[in-house]
Image: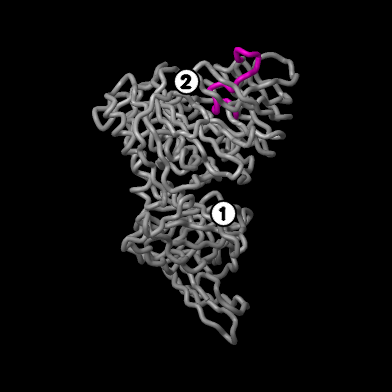
Amino acid sequence: MERVFHSPTAVAGALSLAACVIASAGVLAASNGRIATLDERIAGAQKVVVASARSVDAGWRENTYGDRLIVSRVLLDVEETLKGGASNGPIWMELEGGTLDGFTLHVSDLPDLRAGERAVFFLDQGDNGFSLPHLRGQGILKLDKDNLVTGSSLRLDAIRTLARGRR
Amino acid sequence: MRMSTRARLLTTALCTVLTISALGVRVKSYTTNGHTWGTNQVVYYVNPSNLYVSDSAAISAIQTAAAAWHDQSGANIQLVYGGTTTGNSLTLNNKNEVFFRNDSDGYIGETYWWYDGTGHLVDADIVLHEAYTYFAGSGCSYGIYIEDVTIHEFGHALGLGHSEFANTTMESAMPGYCDTSQETLEADDISGIRSLYPPTASSGGGNGGQAPATPSGLVASVNPSNAVSSLLLSWSDNANNENGYSIERSSDGRTFSQIAQTGANAGSWTDTGLSGGAVYYYRVRAFNNYGNSAYSNNASAQTQAESAPAPSSAPTSQSSLTARGYKVKGLQTVELKWSGLSANAVNIYRNGTVISSSANDDAETDNINKKGGGVTYTYQVCAADGSSCTNSASVSF
């Protein structure tokens, strides 16, 4: 990950990124999905947390469309709740994809998530009691050790600011 | 307030530029998932039933998208149409299926791929969500061309991840409704698929085609408009059949990694987002569907240290600088001559760092006191009052 200094330029850049993410609502129709703005994700998700994956366990599951998929159940250790109640207790989340019985399933719009990885999770409550990432892969923004969203210059602080602004 | 689609598209384009320039975001090239098919012919089936176009139009559009990966790249992989299917589920059944689903997933298309313990792909299914309106061939209005989205999904099915290069087929974001640009593979897409399935003579990689000629005269120099964090590269484009140039960078002159690709006929590139006061090494090579050229010479330059005074002005049209390198008893020596600067004193920069301040007497000799070769020095002379600078001039030993 390229190191980005917390300079005035970077701050201005982060703010312009946030502004752009807000302003371009719903435009980028990704070939694998419509890219929602951060604001939309915060507004749409029932819960937003900063958390680390304590464990990832895969199982088979068949959904209502008849898809028989490997689904990973991820136990999240919450370190900070940005939206959706003050409880910082662990959360179970389900994510399509994983490795089981000698096969690995990967879904184009979903990230791999391994134990120990840390991210901002935008979560909805699923029907089976597990949380689901809001807007699928767009509901998981992995963080590096410098609190930057992986592959971007977006800082956790910028997400915090947006989330608090909506409280 | 609800923005018009056009306004939002413009906003998006502007914001993309703003984000990249303001944050110094470094674009990365193609990514792979680390898995390939254990064969060079992958059969797929189409369930053409959908809400928007005829079955035959859907099949034709999907076939067009599938063929592109081989036809446009020469990669040793072919997606072979196996006929229609009634399958409409995402299941590990060793049958690669493309189908439409009438749901409100929010996504246009998704690919589910499976690999086994050997690392080989064994199944890949593509679902196109009918919350979007689909078109095939022509006549699109506020919808999606099946060809445009399916070529991207087939890229996943073959083992490619998302690219962060703008306008590539494997870029995660589609430019907008009725886009057709993704139907044409960009150089980055071609490099990606060819890395997974290298071309052979039988795949079209050797049918009289030739790899492009090697670029030469690579020079790296300080970017006068951003000396602390940017370097300029230039080279001679010696090829007439290249798809583009790949640019590689190293911090030690030994281990290089690709940082960018250009289009055809490029002869320069600007590297940004660099650290101040650091030396960077570069090499470039041309590529086309038939292979890569040899590498150019290596070139290096040093960004200006953040604490050093920066050349504060662009070259004036009246000033000029020439640099001539020679050796005195084996030691590198550079003779500088300039004109056109009106200040009483000047600062002389070597690779972005001030090496001397002197009277503006239009000449200076830089005794580098080093032996050997394989190094390039880039000079610029600026008025001490910051009013103007000469052009940059480079010397290689």
Q: Position of residue A42 (x, y in %)?
A: 57, 20
Can residue A148 be seen here? The reply is yes
Residue B364, relative to residue A27: is it above or below?
A: below
The quadrant where residue A7 appears: top right
Callout 1: few (<14), some (14-19), or many (20+) C-alpha neighbours within 10 Å? many
Callout 2: few (<14), some (14-19), or many (20+) C-alpha neighbours within 10 Å? some
Left or right, B200 with reference to B240:
right
Kind of residue at badge 2: Asp
Q: Secondary structure at mark 1?
A: loop
- Image quarter where the N terminus of chain B lies is top left
Kindly identify the residue that appears in the image at 36 percent across and 66 percent down. B238
Q: Nearer the viewer, residue A111 or B127?
A: B127
Q: On what subunit does the disc labeled 1 rest?
A: B
Residue B279, relative to residue B76: is it above or below?
A: below
Residue B185, relative to residue B383: is it above or below?
A: above
Label 1 vs 2, first from the N-terminus? 2
**Residue B220 numbered tag:** none
Q: Nearer the viewer, residue A66 or A52?
A: A66
Can residue B27 be seen here? The reply is no
For residue A47: magenta? Answer: no
**Residue B228 numbered tag:** 1
Left or right, B322 with reference to A86:
left
Kind of residue at badge 1: Val
Q: Label 2 near label 1: C-beta < 8 Å?
A: no
In the displayed image of the protein, which residue is found farthest to the right? A89
Kindly identify the residue that appears in the image at 49 percent across and 37 percent down. B19
Read off the residue under disc 2.
B105
State which region is magenta. Answer: A126-140
